[in-house]
Amino acid sequence: MAANFGNLSFETGALSNLNTRSREIFRSIVDSYLATGEPVGSRHLSRLLPMSLSPASIRNVMQDLEELGLVYAPHTS
């Protein structure tokens, strides 16, 4: 089953397959983006999360979330 939100479309099964760490990171990305409307970086997330993770570890999870179609990263520099 696919969920569609405007131009966002993803398999709802992707959410149920996430582990606890990935879910927490995903939740923080969504919450932060909804609060600010700005892209969310791994360093910012590492400061927000209740668990101790390096920005590099968070980037790995963010890449997994992007591959699942749950987030989009414009990769601007």
Image (tube, rainbow, N blue to C red):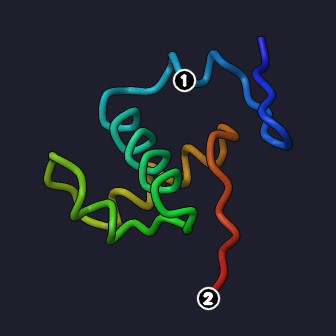
Residue 55 horizontal/vertical position (percent): 31, 67
Task: Give the answer, above or below, for where 11 lies relative to 6.
Answer: above
- Pick the quarter of the image with the N terminus: top right
Residue 47 horizontal/vertical position (percent): 21, 64
Residue 75 horizontal/vertical position (percent): 66, 74
Distance Cα–Cα, label 1 vs label 2: 29 Å
| Circle number at residue 77 | 2
Residue at the far top in the pictured view: 1
| Circle number at residue 51 | none
| Circle number at residue 15 | 1
Q: Is residue 15 left or right of residue 56?
A: right
Look at the numbered disc 1 and give the secondary structure of its residue.
helix
Residue at the far front in the pictured view: 35
Look at the numbered disc 2 and give the secondary structure of its residue.
loop
Residue 20 horizontal/vertical position (percent): 31, 28
Q: Please rate how many residues cluster around mark 2, counting C-alpha atoms within 10 Å: few if below 14, some from 14 to 19, many from 20.
A: few
The residue type indicated by label 2 comes to Ser
